[in-house]
Image (cartoon, rainbow, N blue to C red):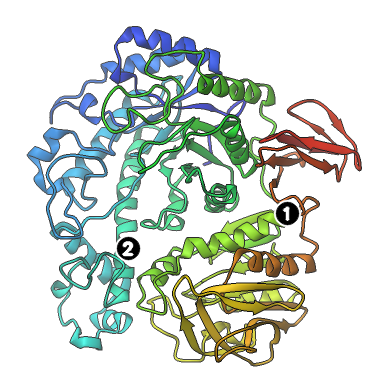
Amino acid sequence: MTAPRTPKIPYGGDYNPEQWPRQVWDEDHRLFTRAGIDTLTVGVFSWSLTQPAPDTYDFTVLDRVLDRARAEGRRVCLATGTAALPPWLAKRHPEVNRTDFEGRRHRYGQRHNFCPSSPAYRRLATAMAGRLAERYAEHPALLAWHVNNEYGGACYCELCAEAFRGWLRERHGTLDALNDAWWTTFWSHRYTDWDEIEPPSALTEHWRGPDHTAFQGITLDYRRFMTDALLGCFTAEKQTIRVHDPDTPVTTNLMGLYRPLDYHRWAPHLDFVSWDSYPPLDAPPTRAALGHDLMRGLKDGAPFWLTEQTPSTTACRDVNPLRRPGELRLATWQAIAHGADAALYFQMRASRGACEKYHGAVIGHAGRDDTRVFREVAAVGAELSAFGPVSLGARTPARTALLFDWDSWWALEISDGPSRLVRYPDVVHAYYRAARAAGADVDVLPVTTDLTPYDVVLAPVLHLVKDDLADRLEALAGRGGTVLATFLTARSDVHDRAFLTDVPGPLAPLLGIRVDEWDARPQDVAQPVDLGEFRTTARLVFELVQPRGADTVGTYGADFYAGTPAVTRHTVGAGEAWYVATALDQPGVDHVVRRVLARHDLTGPYAGHPAVETATRVTPDGTRLLFLLNHAPEPAALTAHADGTDLLTGKRVDRGEPLVLDPLGVAVLRLQ
C-alpha cells in the first residue's frame, strides 16, 4: 500500500479545533479556503477528549470535526490520539508512566510519557485505535490514518527490563552467544542467568549520560530493543485499524535524523513515510535536504509526506529565529524537489496556552488574514493549486548513493575513543553536502540496499560493517563504480566487536590500505593536508595509513606523520575505492567528492553556483522535472542547460539562453 491518491499535492497541517469554541471553527474554515488549505491532521492529542474515563468513549467533537471538513471539501488525516496519556490512565495504571535513565519513575505529565512495554498502555491504545477505525473507516473525509505522534524516548522500568530479556533470548538464543557478543569476559561480567541482565542506565553500565558506557554491546542492543518496542506499539494499533479498515493508508510522523530510533526497522511497516522537518534555521539548506533524502530512501525511493514544518518559527529551542520572507516557499519547494508528495504545517491555529503558544502558526492568536505569514502560506497554496498533480508519484533517478546506518551512528558515539567529538550526522552531512553542491542527485539508503543501480557509493564513518556489505561494495567497484569510505569505517562487527584483522577490517582488500595507529586532537588543532593542486586542513582524528596497493592522493603536512597518506585511491577491477583517513574541512571534502563524481560525469551544470540547489524527479509517465532553488538573497544568473518549460511561470526556456532565479527563487522545469 502507498500514500493516498490525491488530485494535487495535499496542503494544510495539524488542526486542533477541540481547543476552540464552535464560532472559531467557522472563521478557521473561511481562512483555510483563502489559504488553499485542503488537508487537515486532526485528533493528534485527543485521547482525554475521546475517552474521558476508562469505560466512557465520546466522539461528539471528532464527529463534528470530520463532518465539517467533509462539508468544506477538505480531507482528514485522522490520528489515533495515543501519543499522550489521559490523566486517569496514569492514575489508574501508574506502571504506564516511564522510568527515566536515572531510574526515577515519573508521575503524570508532559508527552512521550508512556512505557512501550506496559500491557495497560498497549491494551487501551489499541482499543482506542479500533474504536476510531470502526467509527470512521467509511467517512468520506478520511484520507489517511496517523498513528500516535513522533514516537521517541526510552523507558528503563522493570517491565522494559523483562521485555528486553525476552528480546535478547530471541536475538541471541543462548547466554553463551550473548556473552560472546557483548564480550562479557571483560571486567568479570559473564552472565549465567537471563534474569541477571539489567537495562543499561545510569545505575548500571553508564556514567555521565547515555553515551558513556563500559559495554557497548548491551547499549547497542538496548537501542535496538527500544526501537522494536515502540515499533510494536505502532504495529499493534495498525493491526487493530486493519480489522475495520483494510484500505486506508496508515503512517506515523517520523523525525528525520533522529538518533533514538532506527527508522530502517520501521519502514516495512509504514504504508507511506511521513516526517516532520525542523532543521535549525541557521543550518545550511543541505541539512533539511539530507533529512528529505533519508526519508525518501526508507521505502526504496518512494515519495514521502512532509507532515510538519513551521510556517514561521519554532518554540522548543533556546533561541527560535523567524523564517525570513520567501524562506517558507523555498523550504516547501525544496521538500517537493526531494520527493515530498504533501506539504503540511504545524500548526493551523496558534494555541492560546501551554508550551506551544508561541510556536508559529498559519493563523495567529488574533485570527487575522493580513499578516505576512498568512499571506505567504496563501501564496504557496495558490501556487500548489496551479501546479496540480504534476509531481505526484515522481521518483529521483540518482546514480550516487550515500549509506546511512543507525547501528554505526550508535556504535560510533557510544565508543570510548578515539574522540567523543566526532559526530556521525556531521560527517555524513559533510559528504552529502559536497555531493549536492556538485550537482549530484543522492539517494540516502540503508546498508542492505541493492547497489547495482549506482555508480558512486559514499560510506562516511560506517563504523560497523555487517553481513555481505564488503562483497557488494567490491562488486560495485569491480564493474567500474567508485566507493568512498572515511576514517573510523569498518572498525567493528554487528555486535561492535573489533575485527581481529588489520583496520579497516573486511574493507581492507577493497581499499588497499592498512591502518595501524590513529591520533586524536582537540577541535582547535588543525593539521594541514596536501591534496596536490589543492591544500586544506583536517581535525579531530588522523589515521596513519600504510598503502597496500592503494595510491596516495593526499598527505598530512605536520606532526611525525607528515608526508604519510591522508587520502588514498585504489584501483579495483574497472573501478576505484577511495579512503579519507581524517576529518577534512568542508572545502577538502568538496574537492575529494568532486573528483569522485567527475569520473562518472555526475557533476551538475550549476556546480559553480554554491547557492543554487538542483534536484531531479521523474514522473510515472517518464516526464523529467528539474527543480532549481536559489538559497541566496541575491538573484542567481544561470544559463539553461536544456530545453524546458518553467511550470511555475509557464515560460519557455531554451538551451543556452539566460535563466535568472530570483532571490530565494524557485523554478520547476519540465524538460523536453
- From the image, tell me which residue sits under label 1: 439
Side of 161 where 456 appears, left or right: right
Disc number for residue 223: 2
- Give the residue drawn at x 40%, y 32%: 245
Please state the horizontal and vertical placement of residue 563, each as a whole percent of the image.
Answer: 65, 89
Judging depth in this view, the residue of 62 and 333 nearest the camera is 333
Please state the horizontal and vertical placement of residue 161, each as a whole percent of the image.
Answer: 18, 63
Side of 561 where 177 appears, left or right: left
Judging depth in this view, the residue of 419 and 527 nearest the camera is 527
* Observer able to see residue 322: yes
- Give the residue drawn at x 70%, y 76%: 477
Q: Quadrant of residue 669?
A: top right
- When the figure is inspected, residue 118 is found, relative to residue 365, above or below; the finding is below
- Give the residue drawn at x 39%, y 57%: 259
Disc number for residue 5: none
Which kind of residue does numbered mark 1 sit on?
A: Gly
- When the figure is inspected, residue 89 is found, relative to residue 591, above or below; the finding is above
* Quarter placement of the C terminus: top right
* Observer able to see residue 73: no
Side of 162 where 359 appears, left or right: right
